[in-house]
Amino acid sequence: MEVMVVESPHIARSYSDCNRRRSDDSPLVRCQTSCSSSLHRLLVHSAAECSDDAICKLIADLDSPSIESKRLAATELRFLAKHSPENRVRIARAGAVAPLVALLSHPDPQIQEQGVTAILNLSLCDENKSAIAGAGAIRHLVFALRFGTPAARENSACALLRLAQRDDLRAAIGCSGAIPALVSLLETGGPRGKKDAATALFALLAAKENMTRAVEAGAVRPLLDLMADPESGMVDKAAYVLHRVLSLQEGRRAAVAEGGVPVLVEMVEVGTRRQKEVSMLSILEICKEGAAYRRMVVREGGIPPVVALVQSSSEKTKEKVTSPPT
């Protein structure tokens, strides 16, 4: 992404939340269906020892006319895939992906939620991503992201993130309407939902066409709001997503129109070292847009802190700052 992408260990650390979540870890690990606590314990126990026949029986139950059978089968498959890489492969190879994907748009919210989380857990295995995408999961995950329970929305965002780690799927995810749905989660979700949305957006914005979609979906305003609110716990994540958006002319113009220059200047002045560096690079991108924007940065008092930061920055950062516009 040329000079705009701050490819550093800081980004990897800042955007590792969903990656650290090796399987679903929501409060809904307790079975939020009519499952009893004893059944929950049975599900956890069965994850360690489940035969191929048992897996096939659970997959068959996903197509049962019984709502309860569907729900319990999806829940148990979810737990089987939660901590076991081997089970993730076994479940997918046994044919679970397509019937689980069918549950992602199910009218019963708990069935949908269990299906989404099972797909998330299966997507943690790279080998399963093609099968998941090939079964039409992207469109259904976007549906759950828009209309599901809070946990279903969060886990849909994480599943889309996992799929977006494949270069060949980012454009398809963007075309599916995922970007506006993720921006909505960024605006209206809880703390975890906002983090999941930002992480997924960061991955998807590696594709230029998705940057345009993000600007058109109104991503700049909520990103700036999160950057301006230290209590959000989202300053770093939002700053890195905005940084990618600013590689586009329309992104730079949207950031200025939404009052982004004062936010970025303040971050250069009082942010952490990581926040100062990414906001400095964002300010420099805005300055490339034209003299009017440079005057705006000057009026906001942005030049002295940027100069001071450049002087104390690493050689790599100095190289980014002093490189000529492309």
Image: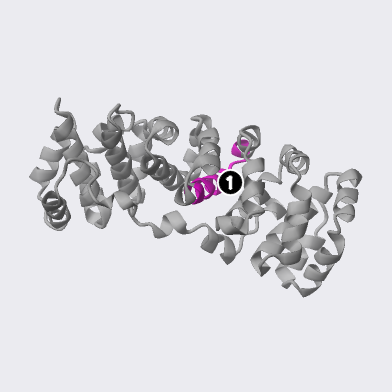
Q: Is residue 316 left or right of residue 181?
A: right
Write the residue at 89% across / 55% down.
Answer: 298
- Residue 180 lies in magenta, yes or no? no
Write the residue at 32% across / 33% down.
Answer: 104
Mark 1: give few (<14), some (14-19) or many (20+) Cα within 10 Å. Answer: some
Q: What residue is disc 1 on?
A: 206
Identify which residue, 159 or 43, lies in the foreground. 43
The local secondary structure at tag 1 comes to loop
- Is residue 326 visible in the rendered image? The answer is no
Spot occupied by residue 150 in the image (x, y as percentages of width and height) = 40, 41
Write the residue at 48% across / 40% down.
Answer: 168
**Which amino acid, mark 1?**
Ala
Spot occupied by residue 132 in the image (x, y as percentages of width and height) = 34, 38
Spot occupied by residue 100 in the image (x, y as percentages of width and height) = 26, 35
Labels in figure, total: 1
Identify which residue, 31 or 204, lies in the foreground. 31
Most common SS among magenta residues: helix
Q: Is residue 127 left or right of residue 6?
A: left
- Is residue 9 visible in the rendered image? The answer is yes
User: Given the current orientation, which residue lies at the most extreme bottom position?
Assistant: 312
Write the residue at 73% across / 53% down.
Answer: 263
Spot occupied by residue 56 in the image (x, y as percentages of width and height) = 13, 40
Question: Which quadrant holds residue 267?
Answer: bottom right
Identify which residue, 6 or 114, lies in the foreground. 114
- Range covered by the magenta-colored residues: 194-210
Question: Which quadrant holds residue 32?
Answer: top left
Q: Is residue 31 left or right of residue 297?
A: left
